[in-house]
Image: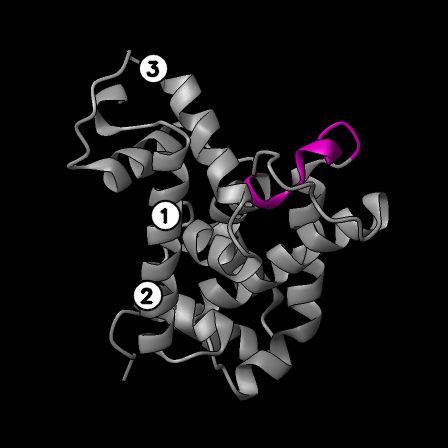
Amino acid sequence: MPKHGVQPDSAVTQGLLQQAAAGDRQAFEQLFARHQAYLQRLVELRLDPRLRSRVDPADVVQEAYLVALSRLSVYLERPALPFRLWLRQIAVDHALKARRQHLGTARRALGKEVPLPERSSVALARQLLVGDSTPSQQLHHRETARRLRQAVAQLPRSDREVVIMRHFEALSNREVALLLGIDSATASKRHGRAMLRLHRILSEGGMTESQL
């Protein structure tokens, strides 16, 4: 029985997994193809923007495919995660691997922007600042998104990760808990703490609801 808050594998996915377990390579290829667009968006979100001229997200997805294929038998023995989340972990790991290979282990300077989609950044800023009413001049969406990205960059790494997973990957609280290896209550508290910090950073920077 799937745990509450975690999207279970569909009947089609389960059927293809059974075929793949029996050695059907084509079944695995069909499985991966069903998730390829999702993985492409995920890698584009997670890939450091400084690598865009050197690393093609499609190549990272292809590497994830090869790794998933080689590890499939181990996964099928003890599938601790739904198949989509298992693929997600592999793809994210390879996006981080690309960063280490090309940029080393240097940390992002405090105050720089985290590369996040503009529309989602604006939506999150609006969610955080509901109820703030200090009058100020209107900001364009691009400026709103820029300030949100800067605020996210100032969060501690663990809080930043939860915000990105919940609001930019659209993962549930339970999915976040599974991926981070923590319980749902801890994941929920970490998310709430991160949102409070984001609100404070944005407010201290002079941004209010009236600017959105």
Give 208 or 43, whichever is nearer the viewer.
Answer: 208
Residue 83 visible in the snapshot: yes
Give the residue drawn at x 32%, y 65%. 173
Give the residue drawn at x 64%, y 48%. 61
The span from disc 1 to disc 3 (Cα, nearest Å) is 22 Å
Q: Earlier in the sequence, mark 1 or mark 2?
A: 1
Q: Residues within 10 Å of mark 1 (few under 14, many from 20)?
A: some
* Rendered view: 189 above or below 212: below
Give the residue drawn at x 71%, y 71%. 70
Q: Earlier in the sequence, mark 1 or mark 3?
A: 3
The segment highlighted magenta reads 45-54
Q: What is the x, y in percent for residue 13?
A: 40, 66
Residue sitting farthest toward the bottom: 77
The span from disc 2 to disc 3 (Cα, nearest Å) is 31 Å
Q: Secondary structure at mark 2?
A: helix
Q: What is the x, y in percent for residue 19?
A: 50, 74
Quarter in which the N terminus is drawn: bottom left
Residue 7 visible in the snapshot: no
Q: Which amino acid is tagged 1?
A: His
* Rendered view: 60 above or below 65: above
* Residue that label 3 marks: 139
52 falls in the magenta region: yes
* Rendered view: 48 above or below 174: above
* Residue that label 1 marks: 167
Q: Secondary structure at mark 3?
A: loop
Quarter in which the C terminus is drawn: top left
* Residue that label 2 marks: 173
Q: Residues within 10 Å of mark 2 (few under 14, many from 20)?
A: many
| Mark number displayed over residue 109 | none
Q: Which amino acid is tagged 3?
A: Leu
Q: Is residue 74 left or right of residue 45?
A: right
